[in-house]
Image (tube, rainbow, N blue to C red):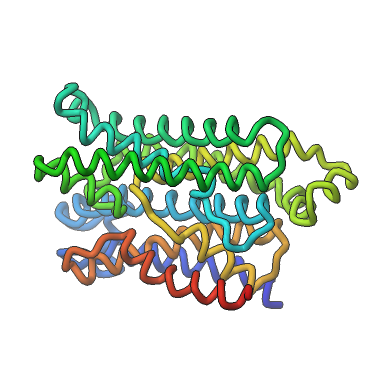
Amino acid sequence: MKTRAALPLLGLLLAAAFLASLAFGELRLGPMQVLDALVGRGDSLSRTIVWDFRLPRTLVGLAAGAALAASGVVMQAFFRNPLADPGLLGVSSGGALGAVAVLALGPSLGLAAASIWTLPVASVAGAFVATGAVILLAERGAGTERLLLSGVALNALLGAGTSFLLTISAGHFEVNAQILFWLMGGLENRSWEHVWMGVPIILLGCLLLLPMGRALNLLSLGEQSAQSLGVDVRRLRRRLIVLATVLTALATAIGGIIGFVGLVVPHALRLVFGPDHRRLLPYSMLGGAAFLLACDLVTRLFPIGLRLGVVTAVVGGPFFLWLLRRAR
């Protein structure tokens, strides 16, 4: 009964978060104003606020939350560790370094203001380069342990590179502020260009992951067990790494560094509804989208400089510590 009611419940939570995201801001709109604006009725001001400002921001948050949560499910099954998150393979750190490099070095190279696509493309490129480097460092055919250690080491190196670029741009206040804001994540000033550059591919990636729930169940038993049950483990690992990298890279490109979504949401839902990935994958996508929209709503209701990454960390940090204590 509990699992049967999960999908409608999560759907209702997502619908409520979606409508609240469209309604709240500097100018609050009523539920009927939002619905009228969505179908093209109502006053012109409401339509402009909803369609030009809040709907792109909401769609980006929805897609980023679903992508990060889905990637978290994949990583936790891949490494057979409930404390794994999408950044383990260096995707987030690589994306951060690519974006920060454009922000810090772009003005001198004429790249920073070249296009709205420059920063996301640099972020995605950095994420894929980082993941490729982790795979090469781990050596072809190696187990997940070597892959995990390579990811940890490369994350440290990429973080150092990002800190170095942040240091050399310290004299440029505007550039430094942009870097800090991007590193802390946020959905401010999202436009329809951000929607088109990220949301369709994220949706496709999530749809490709959904049929892989049974394979993830078998992989959770261990690579040897999965192989003996007919799973092509090497091929499955490649597909999982590619899909998780694409989802995390695009979420980072359109929303900045947003931590703990891929850790908190899948594990919380696993505790409530069980470990079956055939259910956990769609539940986590819905839950991740609702969770990120709710956190973004907090940044609007308390406009005191709160960043989205800060809010997710405030929620996720204590939960992570509780997980560590529970695992012990």
Q: Residue at image x 89%, y 47%?
A: 229
Of all residues, the one furthest to the right in this rendering is 228
Query: Image quadrant for the C terminus?
Result: bottom right
Which of the 4 quarters of the picture holds residue 122? top left
Query: Image quadrant for the N terminus?
Result: bottom right
Would you say 254 lies left or right of 4 here?
Answer: left
- The one of 307 and 79 positioned closer to us in this rendering: 79
Of all residues, the one furthest to the top in this rendering is 109
- 5, above or below 165, in the image: below
Would you say 87 lies left or right of 3 here?
Answer: left
- 304, above or below 80, in the image: below
Q: Residue at image x 70%, y 46%?
A: 211
Q: Can residue 32 be seen here?
A: yes
- x%, y% of residue 315? 40, 71
- The one of 308 and 197 positioned closer to us in this rendering: 308
How many numbered discs? 0
Would you say 126 lies left or right of 224 here?
Answer: left
Q: Residue at image x 44%, y 68%?
A: 316
- x%, y% of residue 180? 23, 50
- x%, y% of residue 184? 29, 54
- 295, above or below 111, in the image: below
Would you say 43 lies left or right of 54 here?
Answer: left
- The one of 149 and 77 positioned closer to us in this rendering: 149
Q: Can residue 8 be seen here?
A: no
- 57, above or below 271, in the image: above
- x%, y% of residue 237? 69, 39
Q: Residue at image x 21%, y 71%?
A: 302
